Image: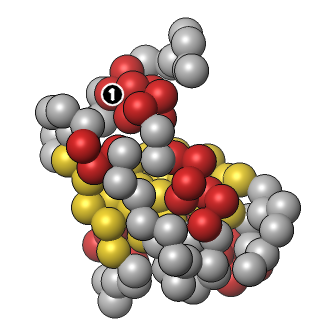
């Protein structure tokens, strides 16, 4: 459980985004599919989460049942720029393509980013 979260001022309507790109990263999607993750996002001021699950088989179900919290799950998007522009926080992994396409875009847009290590693929 997250404690002592920093105060973050969010743009109205912004959401948190978990993105795995084209990678199959079920471990990350499973890790966020819990009430504690939703509670941490709510503490940061988020009321919505977009989950881009890529080619993974795991589909989050626990977080989709959280009260007063909207979850959008999708495999891919053709408009990464729009998805990232509207996100107040992006959580991703450190794969080279992911770093190039998403992280560079985030740096250009001056967004908050949390990168996770990929310990296993497929």
Q: Give the answer, above or below, for where 82 lies relative to 67.
A: below
Q: Quadrant of residue 94?
A: bottom right
Residue 2: horizontal and vertical position, in percent? 56, 20
Residue sitting at 51 percent across and 46 percent down?
Answer: 32
Which quarter of the figure is the N terminus placed in? top right
Crowding at dot 1, Cα within 10 Å, few <14 / some 14-19 / many 20+, comes out as: some
Residue sitting at 32 percent across and 66 percent down?
Answer: 73
Q: Give the answer, above or below, for where 24 lies relative to 65.
A: below
Query: Residue at label 1?
Result: 42
Q: Is residue 49 left or right of residue 57?
A: left
Q: Residue furthest bottom?
A: 78
Residue 97: horizontal and vertical position, in percent? 68, 83
Residue sitting at 71 percent across and 53 percent down?
Answer: 116
Q: Is residue 49 visible?
A: no
Front residue of this view, candidates 76 and 26: 26
Q: Give the answer, above or below, for where 94 lies relative to 21.
A: above
Residue 100: horizontal and vertical position, in percent? 66, 78
Tag 1 secondary structure: helix
Q: Quadrant of residue 59?
A: bottom left
Q: Residue furthest top?
A: 4
Residue 28: horizontal and vertical position, in percent? 61, 57
Q: Is residue 44 left or right of residue 22?
A: left
Residue sitting at 15 percent across and 33 percent down?
Answer: 68
Which quarter of the figure is the C terminus placed in? bottom right
Q: Is residue 83 left or right of residue 18?
A: left
Q: Is residue 26 visible?
A: yes
């Amino acid at each position: 459980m997250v404690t002592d979260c920093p105060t973050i001022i969010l743009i109205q309507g912004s959401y948190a985004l978990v993105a795995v790109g084209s990678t199959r990263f079920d471990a990350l999607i499973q890790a966020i599919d819990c009430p504690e993750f939703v509670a941490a996002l709510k503490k940061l001021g988020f009321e919505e989460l977009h989950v881009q699950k890529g080619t993974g088989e795991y589909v989050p179900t626990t977080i989709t049942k959280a009260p007063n919290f909207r979850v959008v799950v999708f495999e891919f998007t053709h408009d990464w720029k729009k998805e990232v522009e509207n996100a107040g926080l992006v959580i991703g992994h450190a794969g080279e393509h992911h770093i190039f396409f998403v992280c560079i875009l985030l740096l250009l847009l001056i967004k908050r980013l949390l990168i996770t290590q990929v310990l296993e693929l497929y």
